[in-house]
Image: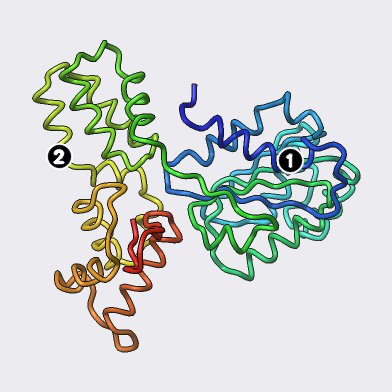
Amino acid sequence: MVLGRASDKDRIIATLPCTEPNIMQEHIRILPIFGFPGSGKTTLAQMVVNDTHSLQGYDFRVWVHVSTQLDFHTIGKSIICQVLGRGQEEINQSSSNVEGMEIIMKRLHKLLNGQKVLLVLDDLWEEDPIQLQLLKSMLTFLGDKMDVIVTTCNQAIARKICTVEPYRLNPLSDETCWEIIKKSIRFEVGEELEKIGRKIASKCWGVPSIAREYAGTLDSSRDAMKWDETMRRGIVSYVLSTFTLSYMRMPPDLRLCFAYYCQIFPSGDSIVKDDLVHHWIALHLIEPSEILSAEQIAEEHITWLQNMSFLQTAELDHACNTS
């Protein structure tokens, strides 16, 4: 059972034209879901695709995992495999190894002509605007009866690939994180452990995978002192294990800034942007380059963290806070 995402699923499904049979679709719809790494974007997309009752209007539901390498041939052949109900190896045997993209596109266009298709492109990392435009053109060519859900950690990617407003997947509440932890533990939690457990839940950044990671550690002991030790150790190791791919794509100095930020500022805290920049520079986590000042580099780092949903602009005051 997935906790805390039912309303998100309902909102996504409500935007799909197949749930509104009286509306004629004239253009392909590309709806990105973006949010914090580990926040459950893939799980949410799976919940949508698996809701067969709501999605009866689709002839085909297709799932393609993209990840770091955007390969148009792989995407095209994967769609063909799933539509024909045949394996990738069988498709490869029936087509040339040097089969051009033009031939693949013709096969796809013939297969999908007049068909209502829901396509999920999961875990898109490609940032090159030219490649993203090519992907958009490829999807548009396949027909206006296709709806596409794209999951990505990067808001900038979501904005470049979308044809409708992207859907931000917000972090879970502390209460939901505690429910995940509690349901994952194989013994009944008493009052003392619950008090500590709720504090731990507040350190999960609203990320279900971090809550489950904590639960795996807490499940090994009923000792309140060990639970307290787990709480006080901090979350950097959990965060970095969950966000490995995002972390490895960071420039080296941004990795240091990110680790410092995770250690010092709890999830949900408001941070004055200028204060954060001054902290980074004072600790020599950022050094000026030949082209950019330390402040300019810090601004780039903050923009990157905002695009990845690690930071969000607060709607509070005139101090340019982030949180």
User: Residue 40: where, in percent of width, then height?
Assistant: 48, 38
**Image height of 220 relative to 234, above or below:** above
Q: Which mark is residue 306?
A: none
Secondary element at tag 2: loop
Closer to us: 105 or 239: 239
Q: In this rendering, would 97 be left or right of 40?
A: right
Looking at the image, tell me whether mark 2 or mark 1 is earlier in sequence order.
Answer: 1
Give the left or right position of residue 165, taking residue 313 as reference.
right
Where is residue 275, by image quadrant?
A: bottom left
On the question of residue 93 being in view, the answer is no
- The amino acid marked with disc number 1 is Leu
Q: CA distance from mark 2 to mark 1?
A: 44 Å
Q: Residue at x 28, y 79 (%)?
A: 295
Decide: few, some or many residues near mark 1? Use Cα within 10 Å; few <14, some 14-19, many ≥20.
many
**Can you give x and y, in whole percent of width and height, for residue 43 in the image?**
53, 34
Which percent across, then down, holds residue 22? 87, 39
Which residue extends farthest top?
A: 188
Label 1 SS:
strand
Marks counted in the figure total 2
Q: Which residue is mark 1?
A: 118
- Which of these two is toward me, 214 or 21? 21
105, above or below 132, in the image: above
Q: Is residue 117 visible?
A: yes
Who is closer to the viewer here, 83 or 201? Answer: 201
Question: Which residue is located at x 26 percent, y 71 percent?
Answer: 274
**What residue type is disc 2 on?**
Arg
Residue positioned most to the front: 317
- Residue 233's tag is 2
Seen from this angle, which residue lies furthest bottom? Answer: 290
